[in-house]
Amino acid sequence: MSKYPQVTGVEIPFMKPPLLLIGQGSHDDTGAAEFGRFVHRLRCRLEESSAEVSGGYLVKAKPRLSESVASLVSRGHHRLVALPLSLSRMEEFPAAMALEQERHPTLMYDYGRPLGPDPRVLSLLAERLTEAAAEMPRLRPLDDVKPRLRVVPSIPVEEPGEHIDPAETAVVLVGEGSTDPAANAEVHRVSRLFWETHAYDFMTVETAFVSVTPPGVPGGLERCRRLGARRVIVVPYLLFAGGMLERVWAQALAYGAGHPDLDIRCAEVIGDCEVLADVVIDRYEEALQLAEGVSA
């Protein structure tokens, strides 16, 4: 017998429990738009296997987690798979879902693991690194930019650059930064895995963080410079574009302004793509299989 409550008198058009993707949330419209597009991608993929997909944020952005859960319950879903759309664990996740169970006593959920460091995620990082390492104009600040003008480093200034071997090139993998030491340690672990599996031709892969915990992006770049790197590629360990990515770029540009002899390049985020969707779907199926094993 299933451990989940049976609902009678309600017709549920989907056979599998819904997938609820949970985002951290921010006031960033760009990040919210990418999150929304990715939810739509998963919805198109999983509707073929009779599973509904919804998304909600813990804070700030809409729809909120509470709204998405209430909508699912109102349509007759009392079991779901809750999956943090994050590269590391969300500290607020357990308390947030506990609160939803208080609001909806019949609600049961299975937990999906965070996405990183899945080998496919590391492969996506390697693709972004390769794109940034290609012979292209180097990234440097505009000389005539007014102080209040936001510089978007994805449009570099044309400047011919000399060939630099990978052995003279360092990588700085940049995570968000957290008050949780275990989450920060996980980013260091990812850096090491990335170096040994995809970036072994490069001088080193250093770890840095956007905020909260040191070293920041300038600290990571400075370490690479002292190690003798002639070029440094900054690889954001981030899912989607937005304010967090802009902060990475801004910190890299600010450091580069004071070190014009160092060729600094910035890679793109992992982004909304089919490979990332594959990882999420596997996490969803894994959570269902574990739940079936427990209830058997």
Image (tube, rainbow, N blue to C red):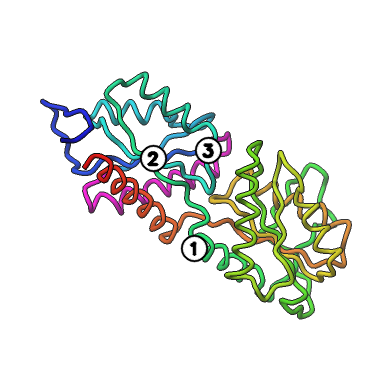
Secondary structure beneath label 2? strand
Query: Which corner quadrant holds the N terminus?
Result: top left
Residue 82, by quadrant, is top left
Residue 293 percent across, percent down from the top left: 26, 46
Q: Amino acid at mark 1?
A: Pro
Observer-nearest residue: 78 or 33?
78
Please, what is the dominant secondary structure of the magenta stretch?
A: helix
Look at the picture and state if 227 lies above or below 94.
below
Magenta segment range? 24-51
Residue 32 on the magenta span: yes
For label 1, the crowd category at 10 Å Cα-Cα, with few meaning under 14, some 14 to 19 and many 20 or more, is some
Query: Which corner quadrant holds the C terminus?
Result: top left
Secondary structure beneath label 3? loop
Return the residue at label 2.
Answer: 111
Q: Amino acid at mark 2?
A: Tyr
Return the residue at label 3.
Answer: 90
Secondary structure beneath label 1? helix
Residue 136, by quadrant, is bottom right
Q: Is residue 281 left or right of residue 164?
A: left
